[in-house]
Image (cartoon, helix red, strand yellow):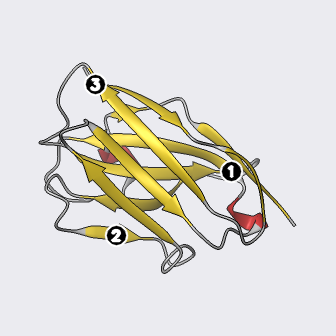
Amino acid sequence: QVQLVESGGGLVQAGGSLRLSCAASGRTINNYSMGWFRQAPGKERDIVAAINWSGSFTYYADSVKGRFTISRDNALNSVFLQMNSLKPEDTAVYFCAATESPLASTARAVYRYWGRGTQLTVSS
């Protein structure tokens, strides 16, 4: 079992930056690919970014490409999401997820372990 806990969410003005963290426990995530998803009210939970187990491959949704950066520190058993140039449409609950797949999958169903999420609100 892998337990994931997100932190770092909050209220930020448009144009600002924030860094989300996801701390894993229970098992080392060295062999897990990790993803960040987000869910706005009334909408589905969508992929934001993903990173494979070694960090050699990353994926970004078009809406965040060039603004967000996913990274991982396997020594800390953690994954991060640096978010710059934030927009009001980035407002959502952000979830960290882990999959045993070696690929940085964009498919929600592939991810076996999920955190409870952290709220990000971007004001205009």
State the mark number for residue 92.
1
In the displayed structure, would residue 98 be above or below residue 55? Answer: above
Q: Position of residue 8 (x, y in %)?
A: 57, 41
How packed mark 3 is, by other alpha carbons closer than 10 Å (few <14, some 14-19, many 20 or more), is some
Q: Residue at x 20, y 37 (%)?
A: 29
Q: Which residue is mark 3?
A: 2
Looking at the picture, which amino acid does disc 1 mark?
A: Ala
Q: Residue at x 63, y 63 (%)?
A: 17
Say whether residue 106 is visible. no
Q: In percent of the image, x 42 and y 62: which residue is there?
A: 49
Q: Quadrant of residue 119?
A: top right
Q: How many marks?
A: 3
The answer to whether any part of residue 122 appears in the image is yes
Looking at the image, tell me whether mark 1 or mark 3 is earlier in sequence order: 3
Q: Is residue 107 left or right of residue 9?
A: left
Disc 2 crowd rating (10 Å Cα; few below 14, some 14-19, many 20+) is some
Helix, strand or loop status at disc 1: strand
Marks 2 and 1 sit apart, C-alpha to C-alpha, by: 19 Å
Rendered view: 64 above or below 103: below
